[in-house]
Image (cartoon, rainbow, N blue to C red):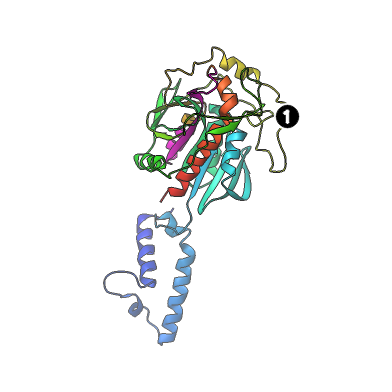
Amino acid sequence: MPGPGRCAAARRSACRAQGSCAGPRRFLPALARDSIADMMHDVRGIMGLLSALMGSGLAACGQSRSVEPTWAILSAFPAEAAAVLRHASIDETVLRDGFEFRVGHVGEKRVVIAMTGIGLGNAAAATRALLSGFDVAGVIVSGVAGSHHRIGDVAVPATWTLLGEGSTFAVRTPWLTLAERLGDPGGVALDRCTIVPDTVAIAGAPVGETLCLGFEPAVLVGGVGESSDPFGGKAFECRPESDDVFGCDVAAADASYPSSSVGVPSEVKEASDGSISATGPWPAATDQETAAIAREAAAAGVPFIAFRAVSDGADDPLGLPGFPAQFFVYYRLAAINAAAAAVAFVQQIP
């Protein structure tokens, strides 16, 4: 890393060579040459050298670079990630520390999209791999959550608390303000209908039939989000050749998930015992990843925000008893709405 003196000297030389410095231009007269042609040859050489240095020494001095910023979009499980990827064009895939990062664009914005895996441990590890391997300008979370809001609504909490640790992480105010615009007319289109999946059989849920909410979902900014660890500090392991909840990756475009699920893993069943009622009281969003992602982002000085659409919450047309029943009926609808809001947010970032 060059020292302050070298940085200042490099900047002065760069701007003088480009003819953009204020004050007397003493650079050319200082070059003692026999001819104007020799002098201009040297100036062109110096400008070329300085141009090559722009991405190294001058960048280390804090001088701005004309490099396209990269925004990270993280989701926990395949259905969430697939909903984001529908909006993206992917240029390359990078494998780092066991996580797959898809690099490409959402509209004109450069993005890196990844699936962290379910749970705090996986989310923290994936975020560390992201931040150590990519120079990202911000981290956006797209996924589902439990909430006191209505099913299908997209919650954007202002703070996230890591239960058990007690740490709280705040979303930066300008990002919350930007997210609020999504609630304006024409801000983002959210779905209200879904086809009931066959991932897990739920009594009273008609598999394969179209189910519509009796209202138009909305983006709701503010309140508190909470993340907990129902897995006792262990990293939840995905299930290869499974479904779009417990599987290990998004299914290829020309493939599909098995028609029969491997069922609900035992650790998830244990974590679900004593199901929470949809009547609450709940925070704006409850999940198992966001606060861990926020902690890693905060440690790196990178802003974060989470778009958590409600998979288990209020105003269920089937009247199901909260999590996990509501989750397995509405998770795909929630994943689609979360992705729509997250992508619309990224596209509006200045």
User: Number of numbered discs present?
Assistant: 1
Residue farthest to the front?
214
> Residue 211 falls in which quadrant of the image?
top right
Q: Percent position (x, y) of residue 56?
A: 48, 58
Residue farthest to the top?
274
Q: Percent position (x, y) of residue 222?
A: 37, 32
Sort mark 1 into few (<14), some (14-19) or many (20+) by Cα contacts within 10 Å.
few
Q: Nearer the viewer, residue 163 or 98?
A: 163
Q: Is residue 123 left or right of residue 299?
A: right
- Label 1 sits on residue: 259
Q: Any magenta on residue 56?
A: no
| Residue 97 visible in the current orientation | yes
Q: Residue drawn 42% across and 76% down?
A: 43
Q: Is residue 131 left or right of residue 175?
A: right
Q: Nearer the viewer, residue 328 or 128?
A: 328
Q: Residue drawn 57% across and 16% down?
A: 272
| Residue 137 visible in the current orientation | no
Q: Nearer the viewer, residue 16 or 197?
A: 197
Q: Is 314 rendered above or below residue 94?
A: above
Q: Which residues are magenta?
A: 294-320
Q: Any magenta on residue 317?
A: yes
Q: Percent position (x, y) of residue 84?
A: 56, 41
Q: Percent position (x, y) of residue 9?
A: 36, 63
Q: Residue drawn 43% across and 20% down?
A: 282
Residue farthest to the left?
23
SS for tag 1? loop
Q: Is 49 rendered above or below residue 284?
A: below
| Residue type, numbered disc 1 | Ser
Q: Is residue 222 left or right of residue 80?
A: left
Q: Nearer the viewer, residue 140 or 326?
A: 326
